[in-house]
Amino acid sequence: MSKTVIHTHASTEAGILANAYLVETENGVIAVDGTLIRSEARALRAKIDALHKPLLAVLVTHAHPDHTAGITELVQSDSSIPVIALPSIDRVMRATEEAKHAQWAPIFQDEWIRQWTFPNRFVQNLEEVELDGIHFQVHDIGPGGDCDANSVWVMTSENSKAAFVGDLVFSGTHCYLADGSIRAWLLNIDNAEQYLDNVSEIYAGHGPAGGHELLAKQRDYLLTYCANVKELAQGNSQLSEEAKQELVTRMDRYLPNASLQFMISLSSDAVAAELALAGDFLSHSQK
Ligand SMILES: [Zn+2]
């Protein structure tokens, strides 16, 4: 088994701080995710070119555009490069593509990538892919929080055992919770603590990499956010403007100076709606 170097591409705020990773092996490069906007994806492609090794594959963690839109710039119409994902990720990408274009193209304008590249090779839960002697195993974690289709890739090489967890973890930033499913997200964290037990490094979808503590921190963030929304929503499925402001103040106090602050109020109604339906999961998830 050969050695690897993991290069992190951390997007700017304009690219929602989305991370993409390049796993450099002896004879090639494997990308994990592809960033959101055109300039970030081109910068990532330039990093691959600078390594003077071929792009062997793109592994996809989940279906959101801040991790998948830029794949088009990475593979540059070369359909022989495998873009590897769960079938569920492909389905969610296709089902949401039109709505995401409508929502974000006017905001990002020329930076928005209108032509998406979909996965062309599919894997099932726990399937292993070998690329230049490095093993990548996929864990299908299903829906949960950030996205309706998520996976975690565990990489085993000579010198490291690492996990690319996508948006299961936002490391040190505020989180996108606008798609609801917080309960499923919490369960996904509980499970990850088991199967990532022997993994030393965790590479997050946003924010810096770290160790196992990232999972516990993510759980604590979600529970704190939910507890505050629950109190401020008072059983309603939406927050008033005033309550949203108060939520922003509280979460800012909880995670001072953290980026992606706009996500605090963006997500509040989806979470209030979930809590109004079944808020009792909060007490069960507390470890
Ligand atoms: Zn993301």
Image: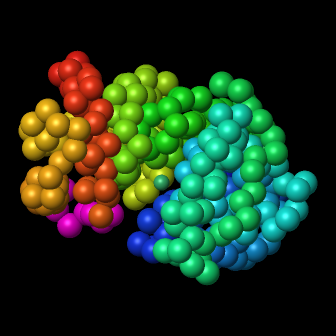
Q: Nearer the viewer, residue 199 or 109?
A: 109
| Residue in view at x 64 percent, y 53 percent | 97
Left or right of 261, for residue 91: right
Q: Residue 136's spot in the image, x, y percent? A: 68, 37
Q: Nearer the viewer, residue 19 or 99?
A: 99
Left or right of 156, for residue 123: right
Task: Indicate whether 230 appears above or below 97.
Answer: above
* Occupied quadrant, residue 207: bottom left
Task: Indicate whether 21 appears above or below 160.
Answer: below
Q: Residue 4's spot in the image, x, y percent? A: 66, 52
Q: Is residue 25 visible?
A: no
* Occupied quadrant, residue 190: top left
What span is in magenta? 255-261
Q: Residue 234's spot in the image, x, y percent? A: 9, 36
Display colour scheme: rainbow
Left or right of 267, for residue 40: right
| Residue in view at x 85 percent, y 65 percent | 77
* Occupied quadrant, residue 223: top left
Task: Indicate whether 134 appears above or below 41.
Answer: above
Left or right of 19, for residue 259: left
| Residue in view at x 30 percent, y 33 percent | 274
- How many numbered discs? 0
| Residue in view at x 10 percent, y 58 percent | 242
Whether residue 15 appears in magenta in the rendering, the answer is: no
Q: Nearer the viewer, residue 120 or 24?
A: 120
